Amino acid sequence: MTQGPLPLILLAAKDHPDTKFRNHLWLILDKWLDAKSPPINSDVIGQKLLEQSGTLLEPFRIDDDDKRISIFLTKLAFVKKSPASRFRIVSSDTMGNDGGLVITRGGQSFYSERYALGSNRLVNSNLRFYAPSMSPMSPLRSTFSGTPHACMRSDDNGLYIDFPVSLMQRVGWVRTNPNIELKSIFKPLLENSVVGPKSLPLTKLDVKFTANENGLSLAVTKPEALIRFSSYVVQGSSVQLKAENAFEIAVELPKTAEGVAPVTIVAGDAFAVQWMNVDGFGFPDLERSDIGAISNWAFQHSHWIKLS
């Protein structure tokens, strides 16, 4: 799935505490969309949302905030280069992302029921969709005190980066049992994590992960691995840990190989998959200042972050 940062931009346009910044993002989004010449206008979509009432068992209603995103995404779904032929909008009152109003590229619409015996139920559908109630539960930076960090240390045997269990919980890698849960992700961590500006896979360095109730550690102990990894340390490069979860962790290596290692929480494409499917829709380019404002409030996105 290639959703890119569009869901994160829309999350900020909807929920960022600064009204002026929200309006600023909407100006960028609307200008970007208008340049694509969507074939269906906002009034037509808005009228369909207003007229749709759903069924007795599954009533349909869209809140005002959800309406703006619904209209925006439906218009975007039908621009010339979009892969979508239909777009589905789930009721604001529905818990989950099934059912809802389906609008076709040709401007037709119908209601898709969640009920197993419903007459218009879509059983197997990969429709792009928007499900308002499924807004991602995410580690917004603004909801935590202090800056997340890891710690780097060394001894006669090698170099180590320790990630506290509180950070693992914050990004959703740990729920109840750190020892077991962290050990279960060793394989994807080794297969997907990278270091340095050219994103060298950690598998090329022969490193290993360990874990206990206190958190996760990256250990570099083999002689050749130490030589190669040390070159990244003296440059103050970054390691990006990816474990096939919604969020990743980028850690800046301290050049002294000792002490605090600043951490950036990074959203991958999967962070909002229950909220919306905008695979292939693209996204507007933002100024670095706008990316910074979103990241300072929420988190980075993997498309934006640049390893150094």
Image (tube, grey):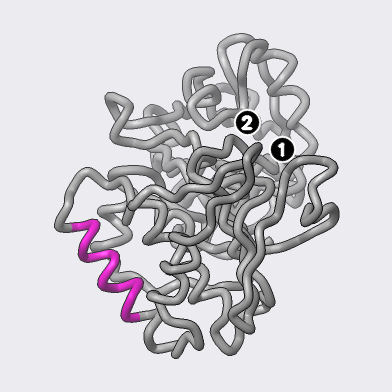
306 relative position to 281: left or right: left
Gap between marks 1 and 2 measured at Cα:
7 Å
Q: Residue flagged by tag 2: what amino acid is it?
A: Leu
Above or below, comparing residue 71 to residue 251 in the picture:
below
**Residue placed under numbered mark 2 in the picture:** 218
Q: Which residues are magenta?
A: 21-31
- Which quarter of the rendered picture does the N terminus lie within? bottom right
- Looking at the image, tell me whether mark 1 or mark 2 is earlier in sequence order: 1
Q: Residue at x 61, y 70 (%)?
A: 103
**Label 1: few (<14), some (14–19) or many (≥20) C-alpha neighbours in 10 Å:** some
Residue identified by numbered label 1: 207
In percent of width and height, residue 40 lies at 49, 83
- Residue positioned most to the front: 56
Q: Are marks 1 and 2 in contact (CB under 8 Å)?
A: yes
Say few, some or many: other residues with alpha carbon within 10 Å of mark 2 (under 14 / 14 to 19 / 20 or more). Answer: some
Which quarter of the figure has residue 44? bottom left
Horizontal placement of 91 versus 227: left or right?
left
Query: Does 116 sit above or below residue 151?
Result: below
